[in-house]
Amino acid sequence: MELAFETLAPDTRRRLAESLAGQQGKEEINLRAALINAAVVGSGGFIGALARYGLSGLVHRQVPFAMFPYGTLVVNLVGCFAIGVVAGLAESRQLFGPEFRTFALVGILGGFTTFSTFGYETFGMIRDTEFLRAAANVGVHVILGLALVWLGYAMTTLR
């Protein structure tokens, strides 16, 4: 049985309307915060992707006939070092606020290389003496990652 709004007492209608308006205001604030975070991450990701493209291209131009993906290696290693520096400063000196950490760690470094996040998360497990979890993390990422690349490639090249 539905309760019609008009059948409620005037005071009850007012409180219900205020409550609903307050809830709507909270939802608008949450939506606005989510959109701002998305813009922060997206703009950082744009910068990181451009930096990855530029650095990888620079490295490949230095060793044009290499049979090894040095550009990707350099990007991943630089990203790992950078996430270590930024996260270390953020944690040990409370140097950056949450917005900058989101921009730098998730946005820029996430766009630059997700390998840095993988390295940082694995480092955290090792730092917390969770050696088995760290080894499992590395093994699962490498083995399943390669298996899924193979599967995706095989699925799209079947004749």
Image: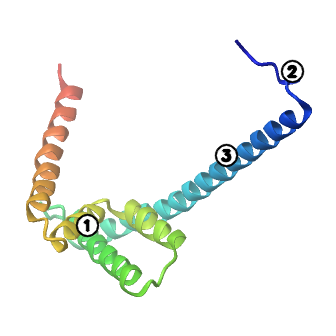
The residue under label 3 is 27
Element type where label 2 sits in the image:
helix
Inspect this view and state whether residue 60 appears.
no
The residue under label 2 is 7
**Residue located farthest toward the bottom when viewing the structure as drawn:** 93
Q: Residues within 10 Å of mark 2 (few under 14, many from 20)?
A: few
Determine the CA span between mark 2 and mark 1.
65 Å
Q: Image quarter for residue 50?
A: bottom left
Q: Which mark is residue 118?
A: none
Q: Residues within 10 Å of mark 1 (few under 14, many from 20)?
A: many
Q: Viewed as shown, does residue 48 lie left or right of 40?
A: left
Q: Which mark is residue 76?
A: 1
Element type where label 3 sits in the image:
helix
Inspect this view and state whether residue 151 appears.
yes
Number of the front mark, 2 or 1: 2
Q: Earlier in the sequence, mark 2 or mark 1?
A: 2
Question: In the image, what residue occupies the spot 28% across and 68% down?
Answer: 75
Q: Earlier in the sequence, mark 3 or mark 1?
A: 3
- Three-letter amino acid code of the residue under disc 3: Glu
- Three-letter amino acid code of the residue under disc 1: Asn
Question: In the image, what residue occupies the spot 40% across and 60% down?
Answer: 111
Q: Viewed as shown, does residue 154 lie left or right of 102?
A: left
Question: In the image, what residue occupies the spot 83% across and 24% down?
Answer: 5
Q: Position of residue 119 (x, y in %)?
A: 23, 66
Q: Image quarter for residue 37?
A: bottom right
Q: Viewed as shown, does residue 40 lie left or right of 72?
A: right
